Image: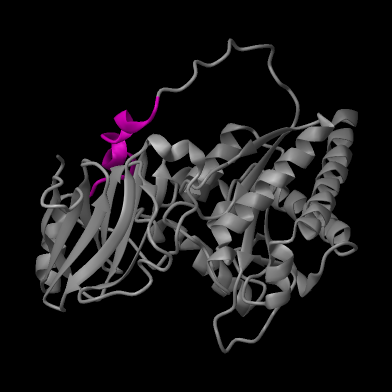
């Protein structure tokens, strides 16, 4: 069993839908907190013992537990309320074969102990985490002892992945333009949520992204790559890397915004492009929130120097021109079929849009904080209309761009 050391992650989350395919994975059936502001204990009920690794992260204070892939079947609302040293916690699939639990702390704390108990005396196997209050100096010392990266932290869980079907022999190269669809959030990162557990952003945008993929693929003219096609967490830099590695012709990130209480009741879809200076304060707030996605899932944020260097290059300027052009085409297609925000075109410094050589947009389908938009987001009829408009815009933009490139 792997033991506990250092630092990481979090915020509250709701239940994660359990696909039928995860039935062979260990099942987590309940979770609870006990203790006070000096000592706090977390207990996770399981159907079989598992390995784990626990570590801490700073600014904000967080604790992360990495475990093999688990089927979370916890009661609704678990993790949204805290106790003692834990403000809240969330959980989910962080990569194939590895799940993660992220705890937001009320202040600095150390991992006093973490262990797995075998089933005994009528109790199921349990994963136990024990936290003790410390001052910041002691916390930072424990933080410096070990700084595990995302992949090494779950590498030992890979053995839990069921055997996969051998890949088919490679055929002739597929030279069709590649479109990357990026459903936001995933795994421990729920995104926004309002109006109950049916309106969790990561699930709404995944459903939309899969429908958009299916619509585009029907034409046969493009190859579609999903950054995620299940409830898996994908780091922001990895989403950008996927688009660049595929030499994508277009990158479309799908999200659904929410306004905090007291900030009004905005509605409608909004299309964002990259800009170092936000078009308005709300666009800047949204970009800051979306850029915290890695931190929410317990990943240390790091800018890639190669991207930062190229951002000032002419290639980046040309890419931004194409991104803005596609945003306008998309707005014109969508406004005739779905409700748009009163200011539908905006820009801000979204990290996920920073591929220097791939035209990229981020589409907020609507506001889960608005009842009308929530009704649309779960409506198949609305989704079909929005998917149709978006796929039409993609086709119109790429057809014109490819024709221009072919004439040169």
Is residue 154 toward the left or the right of residue 353 in the image? left
Q: How is the image coloured?
A: one colour
Q: Looking at the picture, does residue 124 appear above or below residue 194?
A: above
- Please say whether residue 55 is one of the residues in the magenta stretch: no
Give the residue displayed 64% in from the left and 87% down from the top: 264
Residue 313, can we see it?
Answer: no
| In the rendered image, the vertical position of residue 16 relative to residue 398, given as above or below | below
Quarter holding the C terminus is top right
Residue at 53 percent across and 16 percent down: it is 167
* Residue 372 seen from this side: yes
**In this rendering, is residue 365 above or below 35?**
above
- Name the residue nearer the viewer: 5 or 81: 81
Closer to us: 8 or 121: 121
- Name the residue at 87% across, 29% down: 406
Left or right of 7: which side holds 303?
Answer: right
Q: Compared with residue 28, is residue 95 higher up or lower down, i.e. above or below?
A: above
Q: Position of residue 282 (x, y in %)?
A: 61, 77
Q: Quadrant of residue 41?
A: bottom left
Instruction: Find residue 164 and report its image quarter.
Output: top left
Front-most of residues 100 and 302: 100
Magenta run includes residue 156: yes
Residue 261 placement (x, y as % from top left): 55, 85
Q: Is residue 398 left or right of residue 224?
A: right
- Residue 158 % position (x, y): 32, 32
Q: Residue furthest bottom?
A: 262
Q: Which residues are magenta?
A: 147-162
Quadrant in which the N terminus appears = top left
Give the image location of residue 4, x and y in percent: 15, 50
Residue 337 falls left or right of residue 368: right
> Residue drawn 27% across and 42% down?
153
Q: How many marks?
A: 0
């Amino acid at each position: 069993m792997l033991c506990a050391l250092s630092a990481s992650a979090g915020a509250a989350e709701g239940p994660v839908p359990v696909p039928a395919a995860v039935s062979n994975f260990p099942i987590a059936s309940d979770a609870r907190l006990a203790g006070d502001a000096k000592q706090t204990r977390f207990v996770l009920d399981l159907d079989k013992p598992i390995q784990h690794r626990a570590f801490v992260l700073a600014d904000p204070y967080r604790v992360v537990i990495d475990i093999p892939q688990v089927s979370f079947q916890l009661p609704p609302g678990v993790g949204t309320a805290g106790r003692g040293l834990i403000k809240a916690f969330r959980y989910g699939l962080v990569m194939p074969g590895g799940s993660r639990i992220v705890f937001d702390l009320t202040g600095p704390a150390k991992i006093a102990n973490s262990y797995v108990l075998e089933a005994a005396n009528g109790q199921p196997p349990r994963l136990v985490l024990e936290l003790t209050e410390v001052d910041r100096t002691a916390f930072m010392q424990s933080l410096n002892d070990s700084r595990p990266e995302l992949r090494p932290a779950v590498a030992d869980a890979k053995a839990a992945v069921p055997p996969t079907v051998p890949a088919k022999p490679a055929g002739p190269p597929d030279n069709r333009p590649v479109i990357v669809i990026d459903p936001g959030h995933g795994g421990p990162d729920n995104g926004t949520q309002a109006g109950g557990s049916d309106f969790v952003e990561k699930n709404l945008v995944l459903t939309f992204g899969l429908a958009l993929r299916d619509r585009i693929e029907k034409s046969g003219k493009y190859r579609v790559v999903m950054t995620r096609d299940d409830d898996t967490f994908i780091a922001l830099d990895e989403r950008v890397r996927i688009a660049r590695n595929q030499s994508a012709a277009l990158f479309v990130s799908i999200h659904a915004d929410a306004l905090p209480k007291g900030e009004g009741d905005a509605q409608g879809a909004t299309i964002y492009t990259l800009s170092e200076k936000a078009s308005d304060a709300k666009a800047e707030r949204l970009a800051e929130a979306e850029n915290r996605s890695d931190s929410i899932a317990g990943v240390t944020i790091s800018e890639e120097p190669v991207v930062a260097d190229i951002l000032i290059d002419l290639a980046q300027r040309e890419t931004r021109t194409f991104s803005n052009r596609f945003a306008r085409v998309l707005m014109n297609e969508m406004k005739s079929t779905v409700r748009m925000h009163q200011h539908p075109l905006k820009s801000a410094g979204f990290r996920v849009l920073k591929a220097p050589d791939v035209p990229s947009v981020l589409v907020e389908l609507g506001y889960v904080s608005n009842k009308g938009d929530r009704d649309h987001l779960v409506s198949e009829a609305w989704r079909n209309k929005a998917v149709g408009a978006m796929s039409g815009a993609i086709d119109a933009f790429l057809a014109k761009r490819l024709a221009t490139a072919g004439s040169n």
